[in-house]
Image (cartoon, rainbow, N blue to C red):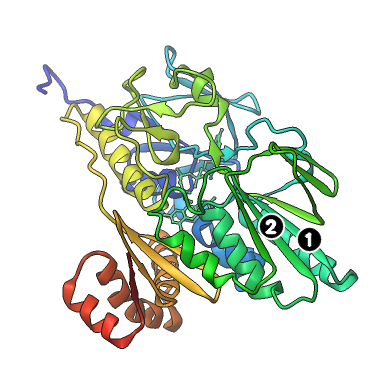
Amino acid sequence: MFFIGKKPNLSSRRIVVAGANFAGLCAARAIPAGWSVTVLDPNPFFEFLPNIHEVISRRKSPESLRLDKAAIIKRAGHKWIAQRVAAILPDKKQVVCDAGNVFEYDALILAVGGENNTFGIEGAAQYAMPFKCADHCAAINRRLENLVHRQKGIKVVIVGGGLEGVEALGEILRAFGRHPGIKISVVEGQNRLLPEAPPVIDPVLRRHCKGLAVEFLTGERVAQVKEGKVFLASGKSLETDITLWTGGAKAPDLLYESGLAQRPGAWAEVDKHLASKAHPSIFVAGDAAQLESALPKQAYHAMDMGRLAAQNAMNLLGGKELATYSPSAKPALISFGEMDAFAVSGNKVFAGTIFNAAKEAVYQLVMTRMDSSRPPTRAARASWRGAQGALNLALGSASSLSSLLALGKIRALR
Ligand SMILES: Cc1cc2nc3c(=O)[nH]c(=O)nc-3n(C[C@H](O)[C@H](O)[C@H](O)COP(=O)(O)OP(=O)(O)OC[C@H]3O[C@@H](n4cnc5c(N)ncnc54)[C@H](O)[C@@H]3O)c2cc1C
């Protein structure tokens, strides 16, 4: 694009970033100091969500998964305001916060993620414990600790046998599995565990739980949750001392109310540049974005999207061509407590506890990269080196594959 007359003064163009965890914080960090950037997010901490399951077993504390958002944003040369965006007025290019403040923007980067989804099931929000942040997992840990000190038989119901439910089960078994009389029921609406992953993992998980007091109720839907009881649509009911809700995420109402999504509960539709299809000066990144071909809602995609949204916000304001988002192929790492872990790359699945080390290494690496003031610990360096082989394998390096398979550290699942 050519400019007639003076080039625009970029420092006077306002970029607002709404939501600053994986996508929003990466976006803010990708914009050089000198631009006028305001970051709005009520939460003072960046939180590494992929490892919150470890808070249930106290392998990690909530604090160990957090970074100080204010310091990171200040170091990037931008302003953070601890407020929640209540409304977006695209025609006026304004966002309104719940405290009433109004912020004007020339480009908006929206990265508000998703919310706990109880699918409107009666009693779920009231009686089931959510599993969406480290504080939720700390509350689950406290409740379980309390129960094991008070009574012998404990009945745990986990609603949702996807990634969150499986990782939660692994940590409950790690920390509380030896408690006499504990019984865990996992309820999953689809016919197998981890419906979003290849089917080969389901039988492996069931084999690990053989002989343990775990029952899998797949193809069963929860109809109602009450104090001490979970009712299934099939007419069965389960006694429960603690019910965990790991049933997935839904889009925040803000997306529909702002005209960025076509119906309530839908994600914001974006084009290949991550620009909203309804309002092109709004870029949507991370879980909140709905691309033409759906992507798994994963932190590594959110971080890449955040950086691209930042680039395109600057390109738009600078009159440059917009860049195209192409998702990178990275393996999903799923941990199953101390028993196993899986790396899923397309249709390929590898199993072995070494992938827990890989997951730990990714956590250490992302925390260090997000906060450049945080020096890499010796443990971080060691776990990164140790996990390199496993990650290379999952990314497709044949030499690591044969050596690790030969060592018996990894199984290829078919
Ligand atoms: C239990 C669990 C396990 C997971 N495991 C993995 C895994 O193993 N690997 C993986 O890659 N991914 C995993 N994920 C998914 C990953 O965490 C998400 O894909 C990622 O967090 C998405 O990043 P985001 O920035 O889009 O949203 P989020 O991380 O959800 O951040 C949204 C931010 O927006 C803020 N916000 C919300 N509403 C507003 C508002 N109205 N105004 C201002 N700010 C707002 C929030 O405070 C938050 O800071 C897991 C998620 C969960 C919950």
Disc 2 target residue: 185
Q: CA distance from mark 1 to mark 2?
A: 8 Å
Q: Which quadrant is the C terminus positioned in?
A: bottom left
Residue 368 visible in the displayed image: no
- Determine which of the numbered discs, if any, sits on residue 72 in the image: none
Please say if the residues under marks 1 and 2 sit with CB atoms less than 8 Å apart. yes
Using the rendered view, name the quadrant where residue 100 is placed.
top right
Disc 1 target residue: 155
Residue drawn 84% across and 68% down?
153
Residue drawn 26% across and 53% down?
329
- Identify the element where label 1 is drawn: strand
Q: Which quadrant is the N terminus positioned in?
A: top left
Q: Nearer the viewer, residue 185 or 326?
A: 185
Q: Residue 253 placed where, x, y %?
A: 57, 25
**CB of residue at label 2: within 8 Å of ligand 1?**
no
Q: Is residue 19 above or below residue 26?
A: above
Residue drawn 46% across and 16% down?
259
